[in-house]
Amino acid sequence: MTALIARLKAQVRLKLLVLALLPIAVLLPIFLGATMWHWLGRFDALLTEKVTSDLRIAEQYFVKIEEAQAQSIAAIGNARQLSDARAEGEGALAEFLDRRRDQIGLDFLIMETNGARTPEPVQALLQRDRDRDMQSGLIVASPAEMALWGDGLAERARLPIRDTDAARPTDRAFEERGLILWAAYQIEGGYLFGGRLLNRNLDVIDRMNALVYGGDVAAPSDAGTTTLFLDDVRISTNVRLFEGERALGTRVTEVVWHKVVERGETWLDRAFVVNDWYISGYMPLSDVTGARVGMLYTGFLEQPYRDQRNGTVLALGLAFLAVLLLAVPIFLRMARDVFAPLERMTSTMQQVERGDLRARIGKMESEDEIGAVARHLDRLLDQVKDRDEALRQYNDQLNDLVDMRTQELRAANEKLEETYAQLILKEKLASLGEITAGVAHEINNPIAVIQGNMELLRMSLTEEMKAEVAMELDLIEAQTRRINVIVGKLLSFSRSGEMSDHSSLVNVKDAVDSALILVAADLRKHNIETRRIDRDVPPIEIVENELQQVLVNLFINAAQAMSKGGTLTVELQESLRDDRPGVEIRVSDTGAGIPADQIAHIFDPFFTTKQAEGTGLGLSISQALMERAGGNITVESICGRGTIFSVWCPAASFCPDDI
Ligand code: ADP
């Protein structure tokens, strides 16, 4: 039962805890996780949006410088000074064009009249779109072509290719081609052909970077990077290598190249750029003929955003933990308000189980269902206690009744045993009486003959002979007398009622007086003092001789027990036995006492401790005589201190007639 309650309690506790903590410990994290997941998605989308817009700005800048360059070349083409210089001659024209080239920041500006310095595909394009005054865009030029346009152009374009992880395999050691932002403007008899070499053109890239990510060319911001690719080679960039040097000649990863240059798509994702992860945007660049020749890249380091994002996630996680730590004790406290009454109920039940029926749950603060259950339980316990008390009372009554009956039964049993013992004794005495009467009778005659012949023997012996055998004769006579005494006693014991003398009212005090006179000589011989405590006692109905015989026997036994002297006390008193009035004669001596193992046998016929001097018949005959008179003899003795015999006989008027 206790284990069951404990288990239930544990289950209820568990359920309540789950109920209390489920929303905060499970649902809240799920909600938080979902929100975070959504937010992280949005965050990534925002980053992608940002890189997209960065890329657009870079592209627009690129378009803008292309347009500005084209307009500048057109303006030169339309200028009167150009016609003047042409008119002046070759030298003046070359000087004019060089001056204007430097003014507008071009790497070359030439006038083509026969297309000798124009690459084949460009020529085809110009031919095709003859009706258009202006053509501009990107072109990829070989070192030989560049050598025709300006001194040192091919050398500037030449970039050593550096080993780059995850880049497309290549056996090229140098990028010798040049990516040129080019424009051609039709003039009379030809066209003005100019452009800017983008390889190593850090001015263009730094301006672009400043435009996209802030800062200025002199002090570039490190918020992001921009790069121009010719095919997959970084020809102009502000991405730095480990040493802080620009990563010119390094290459883009193969996967980006495939997607952007090969397939012409835009890459908007994280990408490993030279030495770190960047949120990157790559867009393809096509030359004037529409062929994809490179890429424009903008990107910013992922790490700060990742740190920020991780920081936010961590902060949110910590905030959740803090909320959990704050809320759990509150929930637990609330849950405890529910456990506490349950636990009080449980402990009360346990007390009751241990036997304390007074245990109660007591007053509950809560007025809810639990409070009602507790009150109900207390009422039930009251009822149980009342019933238990009633049962106990009933049980006590029953026990009393059983005790009473048992006592009655025991008393009845004792009475039965006593009666049975008396019956047996009577039976024993009766049969013993018969035997002893026969034996005594048979012995009497031979004794008489012996005694007679002893007389004759004495008379027929001379004095001399008498003197010789005097001792033997005395011995024979003494023993014969002893036989006589025994036979006499046996006869008096065996005498049945009708054979005994008639009983009469006897004054006990007088009977004690005469008995003491009979034993006076014996008492004196043993130096025994006699004490009397006489009280007025009613007469008893008994054969006077028999009472005397009983008393004499007791006095002689006492005298024998006090062989070295002592006090014999004879006390008379009235005494009730089984509500019957009677007289008690207490005969006390200060003799040796009777050992405990012998006391039960002293009333047995022939039990004696006195060997030849005793017959063992005195007490048994005395008991028989007293019982015959309706009384009895009892004994108490303390070994070494003395013995008390109590002779009790009913007072005369109560003495039963049939005894
Ligand atoms: P007897 O005196 O011939 O032995 P009794 O029947 O009178 O026979 O006594 C039986 C025994 O009881 C005695 O032998 C003795 O041991 C014991 N007895 C009787 N009276 C006393 C007494 N007053 N003090 C001690 N022993 C006693």
Image (spheres, grey):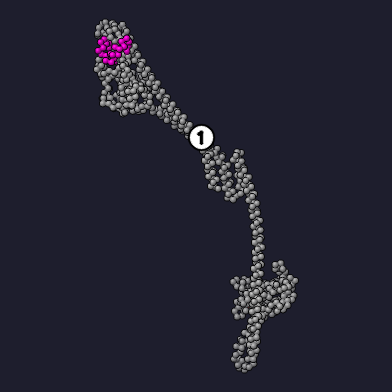
Query: Taking 495 as reference, is 305 left or right?
Result: left
Q: Which residue is mark 1?
A: 23
Magenta stretch bounds:
106-135
Q: Quadrant of residue 367?
A: top right
Residue in the picture at 58% in, 42% down:
341
Q: Quadrant of residue 613?
A: bottom right
Q: Say whether residue 510 is visible.
A: no
**Place of residue 645 in the rendered image (x, y in percent of width and height, measured from the top left):** 66, 73
Identify which residue, 139 or 95, lies in the foreground: 139
Identify which residue, 454 or 414, lies in the foreground: 414
Say above or below: 88 vs 315: above
Q: Quadrant of residue 448?
A: bottom right
Quadrant (top left/top right/bottom left/bottom right) for the C terminus: bottom right
Query: For mark 1, does the 10 Å Cα neighbourhood hold few (<14), some (14 to 19), or many (20 or more) residues?
Result: few
Residue in the picture at 58% in, 46% down:
348
Residue in the picture at 61% in, 44% down:
377
The reply to whether the magenta stretch includes residue 114 is: yes
Residue in the picture at 55% in, 41% down:
339
**Place of residue 649 in the rendered image (x, y in percent of width and height, measured from the top left):** 70, 72
The reply to whether the magenta stretch includes residue 435 is: no
Task: Check mark 1 vs ligand 1: CB closer than 8 Å? yes or no.
Answer: no
